[in-house]
């Protein structure tokens, strides 16, 4: 079933053309990711599909039988509503049936009660409330009476996401789900749960995300928006990168040919031909077309730069026996760590575990309850926080950067101009001379990042740097950080980004405990998973009972208390010892399925299976002990 058909869409803002004559189709079951740098028109395209923007030309036809649902960065809500009331503002027949059913519980009108029950049945709404609460629970929202106005920005995003998923579940007609950066403000456990949910859900999805692991897990089609065009790639993120490289290689070959032709044609043009004949007019027109191709800039600024970093002394940063609590909540407990020159440390943990608090303590923004902090005299911090950029309303991008310095120093004695450094981070000449107020949200975030790096610090601290950054910018940032010779601390839930950059992990594991792990993010997660599996196996598998025979004067009398197992008992023991590991494995698999399942009916079925398997395993363990005692 075709959901959307777009033909020759064009959209401009003033002289800036976002995309030109692009065409595409979305069919039922497609799971599509959009990849583009900020300011390329991703959000505008989504708004056109939602009917909130109008294209300059072209058509976008939405199938009348489908519903389009958007998860946006801007959330509209009444701050006086509780979370539960906000969730119930969904405009769908199953939700209305559920609300009427709750009213009927306090009603004496038999006709109203019968209709409410009939509507619940007709719209299959019996399990909807439980599923709604389960989705909220998975997103760490448990107090449904809390007012929306009291929530943090991240909590509001998570409640809005839960509402969207519930709406998609509640609607039994065809739905196109559009999601703009859904993984922002989610910790790793939540992101992985959302991956599993979207993978299992029978939905059609159009997604904008910077999380490459999430993209690879959920989507099988990638739309690349670049140079006003839209390119479609079927397959993984790696396939997209390979296709893009091939296209650029072909373009560079075309440009080389155009350059050779351009030089020859330029000699002819300099003779000032009179455009009187059709032939000369055609050749002049062809010259300008060739010139356009020849002057195409395909440089993606993937430069190998040898940065001249401010000198680091012998002492970098040392934390000694740091404690920090808020009321009864312990964030740091007797934490000590000595940062080394060139070390790239990733800090991970659940939301609210204390990661940002540690960054604030390191920089002196917040005081520890106990302990010492020693910072080297030569240390110059560069802090990229989650708060926005501060700028004058009419200030231009280039002037904003030049306020720091005209040039960025390189180790070979050369330097980059402010304009060259801006191009390195994907700001073209036109954007450099635009007012900052005209930039998109993602472009402002990119400029903020660049502003920090251009100050040339030798100790970088990044708190969630990947939020709202596009994939091309993330690639440039990763290349920059891999060459960075100073020390680096990153707090991020972006698994791909962390795997590429960090070589050391500090994991907040709760109750003030911070684990020091040498390796990248995925290696830590694998080690943690192995430990948890080992703990489960140790907890379930019985230890053999070792009994010490009483010391007697006549040993033979002790042996006479024992007897051999009968043939039937021996066979029973062998069967039990064979089946127990199988039951343990079966139990572990059911638990994993339960953790990842979102369908209420399947949860009920799995819970029943778990109870049966656990009971059988327990009976086997008891019988195994009895047979051991007989022996």
Image (tube, rainbow, N blue to C red):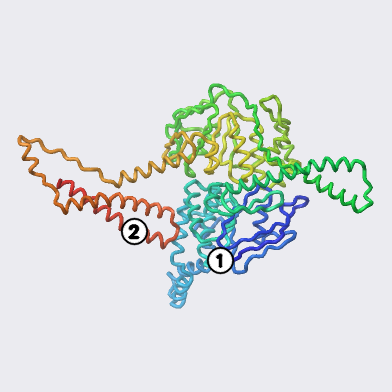
Q: Position of residue 409 (x, y in %)?
A: 68, 28
Image quarter of the C terminus: top left
Left or right of 82? Residue 68 is: right
Name above or below for residue 84 compared with residue 562.
below
Which residue is more in the foreground, 630 or 599? 630
The residue labelled by disc 2 is 609
Q: Residue at x 54, y 43 (%)?
A: 496
Determine the secondary structure under disc 2: helix
Label 2 Cα crowd, 10 Å radius (few <14 / some 14-19 / many 20+): some
Left or right of 262? Residue 31 is: left
Name above or below for residue 229 compared with residue 362.
below
Q: Quadrant of residue 268?
A: top right
Q: Position of residue 386 (x, y in %)?
A: 58, 42
**Is residue 145 visible in this depiction of the protein?**
no
Which of disc 1 and disc 2 is earlier in sequence?
Answer: 1
Task: Using the image, tell me which numbered label, if any, was put on residue 438.
Answer: none
Determine the secondary structure under disc 1: strand
Label 1 Cα crowd, 10 Å radius (few <14 / some 14-19 / many 20+): some
Q: Residue at x 73, y 57 (%)?
A: 21
| Whole-number angstrom distance, CA of label 2 to CA of label 1 | 32 Å
Q: Position of residue 461 (x, y in %)?
A: 57, 35
The residue labelled by disc 1 is 174
Q: Quadrant of residue 207?
A: bottom right
**Is residue 405 visible in this depiction of the protein?**
yes
Q: Residue at x 54, y 58 (%)?
A: 164
């Amino acid at each position: 079933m075709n959901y959307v058909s777009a033909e020759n869409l064009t959209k401009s803002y003033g002289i800036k053309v976002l995309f030109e004559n692009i065409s595409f189709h979305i069919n039922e079951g497609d799971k599509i990711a959009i990849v583009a740098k900020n300011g390329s028109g991703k959000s505008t395209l989504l708004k056109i599909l939602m009917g909130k923007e109008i294209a300059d030309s072209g058509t976008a036809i939405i199938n009348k039988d489908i519903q389009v649902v958007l998860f946006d960065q801007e959330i509209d809500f009444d701050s006086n509503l509780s979370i539960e009331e906000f969730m119930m503002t969904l405009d769908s027949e199953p939700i209305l049936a559920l609300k009427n059913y709750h009213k009927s519980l306090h009603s004496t009108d038999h006709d109203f009660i019968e209709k409410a029950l009939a509507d619940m049945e007709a719209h299959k709404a019996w399990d909807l409330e439980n599923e709604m609460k389960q989705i909220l629970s998975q997103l760490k929202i448990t107090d449904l009476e809390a007012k929306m106005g009291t929530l943090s920005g991240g909590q509001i995003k998570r409640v809005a996401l839960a509402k969207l998923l519930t709406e998609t579940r509640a609607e039994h007609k065809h739905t196109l789900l559009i999601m703009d950066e859904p993984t922002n403000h989610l910790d790793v456990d939540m992101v992985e749960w959302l991956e599993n949910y979207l993978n299992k859900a029978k939905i059609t999805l159009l997604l904008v995300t910077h999380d490459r692991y999430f993209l690879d897990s959920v989507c099988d089609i990638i739309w690349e928006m670049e140079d006003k065009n839209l390119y479609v790639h079927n397959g993984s993120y790696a396939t997209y990168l390979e296709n893009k490289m091939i296209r650029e290689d072909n373009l560079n070959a075309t440009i080389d040919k155009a350059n050779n032709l351009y030089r020859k044609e330029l000699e002819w043009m300099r003779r000032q031909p009179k455009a009187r004949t059709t032939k000369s007019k055609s050749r002049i027109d062809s010259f300008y077309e060739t010139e356009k191709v020849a002057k195409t800039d395909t440089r993606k600024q993937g430069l190998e730069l040898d940065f001249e970093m401010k000198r680091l002394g012998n002492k970098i940063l040392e934390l000694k026996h740091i404690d920090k609590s808020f009321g009864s909540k312990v964030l740091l407990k007797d934490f000590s760590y000595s940062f080394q020159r060139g070390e790239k440390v990733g800090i991970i943990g659940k939301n609210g575990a204390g990661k940002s608090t540690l960054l604030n303590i390191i920089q002196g923004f917040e005081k520890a309850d106990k302990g010492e902090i020693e910072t080297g005299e030569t240390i110059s911090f560069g802090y990229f926080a989650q708060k926005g950029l501060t700028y004058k309303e009419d200030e231009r991008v280039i002037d904003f950067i030049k306020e720091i310095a005209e040039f960025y120093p390189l180790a070979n004695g050369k330097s980059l101009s402010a304009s060259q450094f801006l191009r390195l981070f994907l700001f073209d000449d036109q954007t450099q001379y635009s007012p900052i107020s005209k930039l998109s949200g993602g472009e402002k975030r990119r400029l903020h990042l660049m502003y920090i790096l251009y100050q040339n610090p030798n100790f970088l601290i990044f708190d969630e740097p990947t939020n709202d950054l596009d994939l091309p910018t993330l690639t440039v940032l990763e290349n920059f950080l891999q060459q960075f010779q100073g020390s680096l601390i990153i707090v991020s839930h972006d698994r791909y980004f962390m795997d590429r950059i960090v070589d050391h992990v500090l994991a907040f594991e709760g109750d003030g405990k911070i684990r020091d792990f040498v390796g990248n993010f995925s290696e830590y997660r694998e080690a943690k998973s192995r430990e948890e599996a080992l703990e489960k196996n140790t907890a379930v598998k019985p230890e053999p009972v070792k009994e010490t025979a009483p010391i007697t004067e006549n040993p033979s009398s002790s042996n006479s208390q024992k007897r051999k197992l009968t043939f039937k008992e021996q066979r029973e023991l062998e069967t039990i010892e064979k089946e127990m590991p199988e039951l343990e494995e079966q139990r572990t698999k059911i638990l994993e399925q339960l953790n990842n399942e979102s369908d209420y009916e399947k949860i009920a079925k799995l819970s029943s299976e778990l109870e049966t398997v656990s009971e059988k395993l327990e009976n086997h363990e008891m019988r195994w002990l009895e047979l051991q005692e007989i022996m």
